[in-house]
Amino acid sequence: MARARRLERKPMFAVVVTAVFFAWLYLPILAVALFSLNDKKSLSTFSGFSLRWYDDLVHNDALIDSLLASLKIATVATVGSLVLGTMLALGLERVRSRRGRVIGAVTLLPLVTPEIVTGVAALLLFTGVGLKLSMTTVILAEITFSIAYVTVIVRGRLAGVSLEVEEAARDLGCTPFQALRLVILPTLVPALVGAGLLVFALVFDDFVLAFFTTGVDPQPLPVRVYSSIRFGVSPAINAIGTLMLIGSALLIVAALVLPRLFGRGTSSLDLITGGQK
Amino acid sequence: MAVLDRRGAKPAPRSAQRTWLWGALLALPTAWMVAFFVFSMAIVVLLSFGRTTNDGFPAFATSTANYRALWNDVYLELFWRSLLYALATVAISVLIAYPVAYAVALHGGRYKNALIAAIVVPFFASYLIRMYAWKALLSDDGLVNSGLRGSGLSDGVTFLNTPWAVIGGLVYGFVVFMILPIYASLERLDVSLIEAGKDLYHGPVRTFFSVTLPATRAGLYGGVLLVFLPALGDFVSAQLLGGASTFMMGNLVQQQFTEGQNWPLGSALTVAMMAALTVLMVAYLRATSTQAQEP
């Protein structure tokens, strides 16, 4: 902040672009939310306030099934990727061999692979080994995709845990496993909370992977929403869309803020912006 | 396993760095990634040389027919279009993202974190719903058109099914991946460099192009990569905001695996897409590593 003050003149061009950008970013979303509360079917004239589209949602059994399916998928995938991603992060952080670097690079690949490629590959794998497409296959694909996020966030936190703390624990008579459980894992809690919330939101909202790996019934929520969007725009979609936006916005805000409340240390925000060091 | 064998005979080394536990922890996630990622990618490559049996099932083979099938005018036009859309998306994203990142990083003051969070939050919320938001806004009876009609400016403009609607959707979907790396490199920038630049070159524009921009090149390259990758493979934007005339590679892939049911051809398309992206990634790695060697 001190440095920023030294740049005296604000570049008007950049400030104007930023203001327009924020309007452009939020207006479409706010319009969706506004018209979900409209009492008529119109998407351009707001005639009155009503919750009728939300009432329709509550009575739409297929949609509720999809919502429950997506919640289940996101929960299991979050737990699974937290376990695997943390193991991977711990292993990679301490195994500094060439093999470790290769494994590290491979596990980051899903982050730079377009989702459609991951989705197609998962579809081929599952049908190839004779797994029937279902919620299970969606969960398996989502875990594979999410491990990298967990690993990146946990490694960011691990980098701040000094080796000496761990060696001290060993000197005091801890077995390696005790050192891990009693000394290292507790310091990782903020990172795990942040990563868990982030992954939950990403998986819950994920459309592409779910689209390629889901069975017929129950369809994950984004897949069901997609098929209705293809037929056109409707206030009911506005309502479910608004709820999805609010839900994931809350999760992401929590993922950004909660780890900070645990005191100093890396939050997901620092990691996303690369500002952790 | 090898870790256990190699270390098992010796007494456990005291250094935490050499504990067998760390190696053992790697085993399960590594096996998972090999089974579900590496192996699945290998199947895509294998099936791209496969064929469709007479009763319509995909089967492995050693034919290059699928790749030869890609080389026809219809597909080539589609590849070219995808490339153009993705490049346009990258270019527009740079033009938006650099000023935004600059304003927030260097002039955000104490609101810096709040502003970045305000940018990140909607981008991590449902991509699908954000595409839908654009569709609702731009549709013939949407808010923009009714505003145009109401103000008497125009009888309405068809936005949907145009290339610009699709590109706009892609920018709206992925511009955050440009903002964040540029923001990160601007954050690390030593502001006294800009001041020195102003003393040397006079004028903010020359300073920007001779000091700020080169110093944040790594972030810019990273952003280009991170926007180009998903934009080239996207099919949602073209599906929801465009039509058959704006279809991209992603739509073609998706068709082969759903309506078209030609999985071997779809696999060949996927491999072709990955090959194009790998070239780009290698170029990125080379560009950033040569930069690191410069003083």
Image (tube, coloured by chain):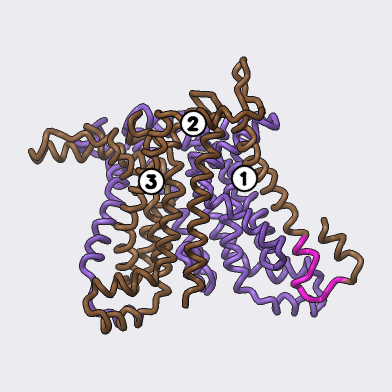
Chain colours: A purple, B brown
Q: Which of marks 2 and 3 is in front?
A: 2
Residues packed near mark 1 inside 10 Å, few (<14), some (14 to 19) or many (20 plus): some
Alpha-carbon distance for marks 2 and 3? 20 Å
- Residue A37 in sight from this viewpoint: no
Q: Name the residue under label 1.
A: A76
Question: Front-most of A181 and A38?
Answer: A181
Image height check: is A89 above or below B154? below
Tell whether A139 sits left or right of B107: right
Residues packed near mark 2 inside 10 Å, few (<14), some (14 to 19) or many (20 plus): some
Q: Do labels 2 and 3 share a chain?
A: yes
Query: Is B17 covered by the magenta stretch?
Result: yes
Q: Name the residue under label 2.
A: B70
Q: Residue at x 66, y 28 (%)?
A: B61
As helix, strand or loop, the secondary structure at mark 1 comes to helix
Disc nearer the start of the sequence (2/3): 2
Q: Residue at x 65, y 61 (%)?
A: A89
Q: What are the residue bounds of the magenta stretch? A: B12-23
As helix, strand or loop, the secondary structure at mark 2 comes to helix
